[in-house]
Image (cartoon, rainbow, N blue to C red):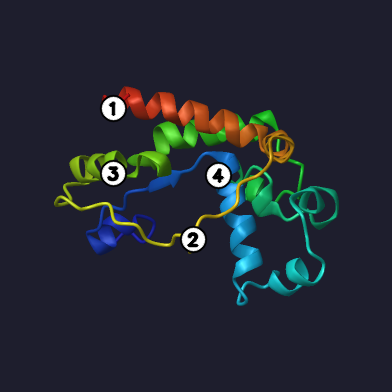
Amino acid sequence: MNTTDGNAATGVDPRVITVLREPAARVRSLFTYIHREPDHPRHAEFSRDAVTIADVYDRVRMEPFDNHQVRYLAGPDAHAKPFGALTETDLELAKRNLETGCTAFGLQERFAESLAWFGETLGWPGVEAGRLNTSPGSASGFSESERRLVLGHNALDLELYDFAQRLFAERTGVH
């Protein structure tokens, strides 16, 4: 048995899939979740200090608010970088990993089409796209200046998301 080849040892052919989300919507969802969810490790701080999105970027500086999708898709070296330290090199690595390392990927805003593509690519049976993990009521959105602040701090994620949208359309035929 070759222990360096997990496939031979287990007979499993692992596949990588992921789902990306428009960066401002992802940050808004996370920000709302932390404020709403008492079990989140930072909830007390966010509630007690009435943390605003500007505070997140000025003093809180949590990595999940900083090009989080690039951080994960670029791999462990990028993931370990401190807040604000990701580079264009990390973005290019994330794009390459998305394009060549993922069997399929989806877009949260095109979830039904993403599930269909996963099914086609991975041989899954048809699955209905239900609504899970959604905020109760409507989450308040960011003002235009807050949105610009978020996107300014997530410019690499925005570029990755634009790339993913084009690649998704090209691979699925869904425009």
Circles 2 and 4: CB atoms closer than 8 Å = no
User: Which residue is situated farthest in the right direction here?
Assistant: 59
Q: Position of residue 148 (x, y in %)?
A: 71, 34
* Figure quadrant of residue 105: top left
How many discs appear? 4
- Residues under labels 1 and 2: Cα distance? 30 Å
N-term-proximal mark, 4 vs 1: 4
Give the residue number, with chain letter if any, for mark 2.
Answer: 137
Q: Is residue 102 visible?
A: no
Give the residue number, with chain letter if any, for mark 3.
Answer: 112
Q: Position of residue 20 (x, y in %)?
A: 46, 42
Residue 96 in the image: above or below residue 49: above
Q: Is residue 55 left or right of residue 31?
A: right
- Residues under labels 3 and 4: Cα distance? 18 Å
Q: Is residue 129 left or right of residue 85?
A: left
Instruction: Give residue 25's mark.
Output: 4
N-term-proximal mark, 1 vs 3: 3
Residue 92 in the image: above or below residue 64: above
Q: Residues within 10 Å of mark 3 (few under 14, many from 20)?
A: some
Q: Secondary structure at mark 1?
A: loop
Circles 2 and 3: CB atoms closer than 8 Å = no
Instruction: Give residue 138's mark.
Output: none
What's the residue type where badge 3 is placed?
Ala
Front disc: 4 or 1: 4
- Residues under labels 2 and 4: Cα distance? 16 Å
Quarter of the C terminus within the rendering: top left
N-term-proximal mark, 2 vs 4: 4
